[in-house]
Image: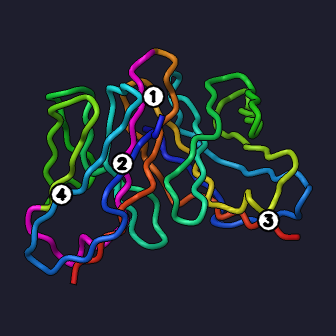
Amino acid sequence: DAKTTQPPSMDCAEGRAANLPCNHSTISGNEYVYWYRQIHSQGPQYIIHGLKNNETNEMASLIITEDRKSSTLILPHATLRDTAVYYCIVNRGAGNMLTFGGGTRLMVKP
Amino acid sequence: NAGVTQTPKFQVLKTGQSMTLQCAQDMNHEYMSWYRQDPGMGLRLIHYSVGAGITDQGEVPNGYNVSRSTTEDFPLRLLSAAPSQTSVYFCASRGSDRGAYEQYFGPGTRLTVT
């Protein structure tokens, strides 16, 4: 699986959009970009995934660059409950287990 | 659905003791896996299974055994506990369908080995 690089920490004001970047310059054509988050030592929670196109669901949006070498997870209106460690993972998908890096610790402040 | 359940929530062992961490899921998922998370680190894969009777090693398998006799259960056995195995252990499952991308994680078992 391709390696990912994320900033170790970020701050965001409550109510503002949180934009979490991820670099995955060695991604292969058949690898997906996944985002998970972990709130205070709970089990990780799936957020969103994508292959080429931008994706949106009820939790977040995922923007993948045209060359697929980087992506951004967007939480449109961050709340205090979004304070967590966010993991960007590149994976071939079906049948493959996840490889977690260090993630980005997002702190949402009032 | 209860999702993925893990027992116990907390456990303290002495060096050399053995124990089994239990994991069960009620979503009829084929894929199950065990991860460990050390303080301030990401999760690392210990063992995984792609179906009943089929298991394979992950990144850090030494000191652990697994078996998968049913679709629902995937226990993790510590053979002879060591202080280096102090960690939080997470079990996860996912479906095998083409569109089943999401992994579901349990709440974790916090293990301390003294």
Q: Which residue is mark 3?
A: A108
Disc 1 from disc 2: Cα separation: 20 Å
Q: Amino acid at mark 4?
A: Thr
Disc 1 from disc 4: Cα separation: 31 Å
Q: Are marks 2 and 4 in contact (CB under 8 Å)?
A: no
Question: Dot 1, how many residues are within 10 Å of its Cα: few (below 14), some (14-19), or many (20+)?
Answer: some
Q: Residue at x 48, y 34 (%)?
A: B1
Q: Is residue B109 magenta?
A: no
Name the chain letter of the residue that bears numbered label 1: A
Question: Dot 2, how many residues are within 10 Å of its Cα: few (below 14), some (14-19), or many (20+)?
Answer: many
- Tell me: A43 left or right of B62: right
Q: Amino acid at mark 1?
A: Arg
User: Which residue is outermost to the top?
Assistant: B98
Q: Residue at x 82, y 53 (%)?
A: A18
- Tell me: B28 left or right of B22: right
- Tell me: A62 left or right of B58: right
Q: Amino acid at mark 2?
A: Cys
Name the chain letter of the residue that bears numbered label 3: A
Q: Residue at x 63, y 65 (%)?
A: A8
Circle 1 or circle 3, nearest the eye: 3
Of A101 and B13, which appears nearest the observer? B13
Disc 1 from disc 3: Cα separation: 31 Å
Label 3, secondary structure: give it: strand
Q: Which residue is mark 1?
A: A92
Q: Position of residue A61 (x, y in %)?
A: 77, 36
Quick one: label 2 or label 4, which is nearer the N terminus? 4
Name the chain letter of the residue that bears numbered label 4: B
Magenta segment boundaries in residue numbering: B79-97
Q: Which residue is mark 2?
A: B91
Quick one: label 1 or label 3, which is nearer the N terminus? 1
Disc 3 from disc 4: Cα separation: 38 Å
